[in-house]
Image (cartoon, helix red, strand yellow):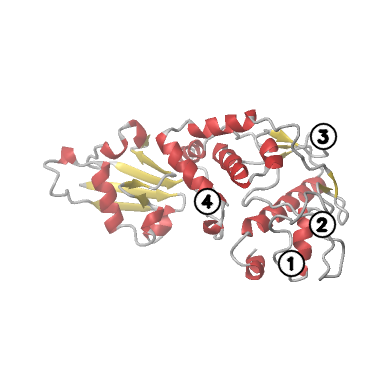
Amino acid sequence: MRLTLEFGGGLELLCDSEKIHKVNVDLPNGAAAADDFTMKHLLSWVRTNLIKERPEMFMKGDTVRPGVLVLVNDCDWELSGQLDTTIEEKDVIVFISTLHGG
Amino acid sequence: MDDIVKMIGLKNNCTFCGVFRRQALDRGAALLKVDKLVTGHNADDIAETVLLNILRGDIARLSRCTSITTGEDGPIPRCKPFKYTYEKEIVMYAYFKKLDYFSTECIYSPNAYRGFAREFIKDLERLRPRAILDIIKSGEDFRIATTTKMPEQGTCERCGYISSQKWCKACVLLEGLNRGLPKMGIGRPRGVNGDHKKETKKPGPAVKSIESKQCGSLDF
């Protein structure tokens, strides 16, 4: 499944300072069809494949670290079910950290 | 700041940075002869500050920190227009409007006490997003008992700026740095509140009463 992932607000530093990643994600064995692919699957894929350092800055447990904003096709994922949001071909997912300053 | 940290270590960094930055802001504002000083503190910042002041028992700041405008009776009033705006809203706005902004985090902030309050608030926000506004509301509704001793506003003997102690915090910290005493101005004083104790070991001016300052906040 081809997706575009973007990282902002400082999170790009965890992915070799690349803000935009065009990726091809293999559907995990558990997903019977493309309909089953959710944010939960995508997050663990990202943690394994894209996050090169300090994974605790991106994720906490099964979900993103509190303070990280997730937009699926420019829509806050809280409106589409957070971890249960289904992901489809050519979706754009943006992760922005809102934690900055001192 | 790096030079300061080399001298004082990795603790209490926010105290030095916050006090000196605030001083720089105030002096700069006075030089430019402005009418008001406006900062970008958002709802998350205010909620963190309320919790921080409770955790540290800082009654004086607790009573002031939720005011949207402070220093109205002084030369330059200060205001925080984003007091009720969530940090998340601001980030989303910046993203959709494609605004350029700095997102770097202070390198010393992992050691800051404020980080604990922030972590807690972020977890609360996830469970019940209204918690942030509710904390601010609670902070606004606090009433301090009339029997509690509060500091009085005077002027600093060294620089003439407003201060609740003999010397303002910036002067105390600066003196400490210049004399190679990184702990000066940090921590609570021993003895009765308001007493000025002469330090028998060190020569110099009578040591000022020192109030501890919470990390990570400019003294508004």
The residue that appears at 73% across and 59% down in the rendered structure is: B185
**Is there any visible trace of residue A5 in the rendered image?**
yes
Tell me the distance, in whole angstroms, between the alpha carbons under discs 2 and 1. 16 Å
Tell me the distance, in whole angstroms, between the alpha carbons under discs 1 and 4. 25 Å
**Which residue lies under the disc numbered 1?**
B177
Tell me the distance, in whole angstroms, between the alpha carbons under discs 4 and 2. 29 Å
| Front-most of residues B58 and A7 | B58
**Which residue lies under the disc numbered 4?**
B115
Percent coordinates x, y for residue B208 in the rendering: 82, 57
Percent coordinates x, y for residue B25 in the rendering: 73, 49
State which chain disc 1 sits on: B
State which chain disc 3 sits on: B
Say which of marks 3 and 1 sits in front: 1
Above or below for B200 versus A72: below
SS at circle 1: helix
- The tag earlier along the polypeptide, 2 or 1, is 1
Q: Are marks 4 and 3 in contact (CB under 8 Å)?
A: no
What crowding class fits label 1: few (fewer than 14 Cα within 10 Å), some (14-19), or many (20 or more)? some
Name the quarter where the C terminus of chain B is drawn.
top right
Same chain for marks 4 and 3?
A: yes
SS at circle 3: loop
Name the quarter where the N terminus of chain B is drawn.
bottom right
State which chain disc 2 sits on: B
Image quadrant assignment for residue B128 = top left
**Which residue lies under the disc numbered 2?**
B208
Is residue B170 rendered to the left or right of residue A34?
right
- The tag earlier along the polypeptide, 1 or 4, is 4
Say which of marks 4 and 2 sits in front: 2
- The tag earlier along the polypeptide, 4 or 3, is 3
| Front-most of residues A7 and A20 | A7
Q: Which mark is residue B135?
A: none
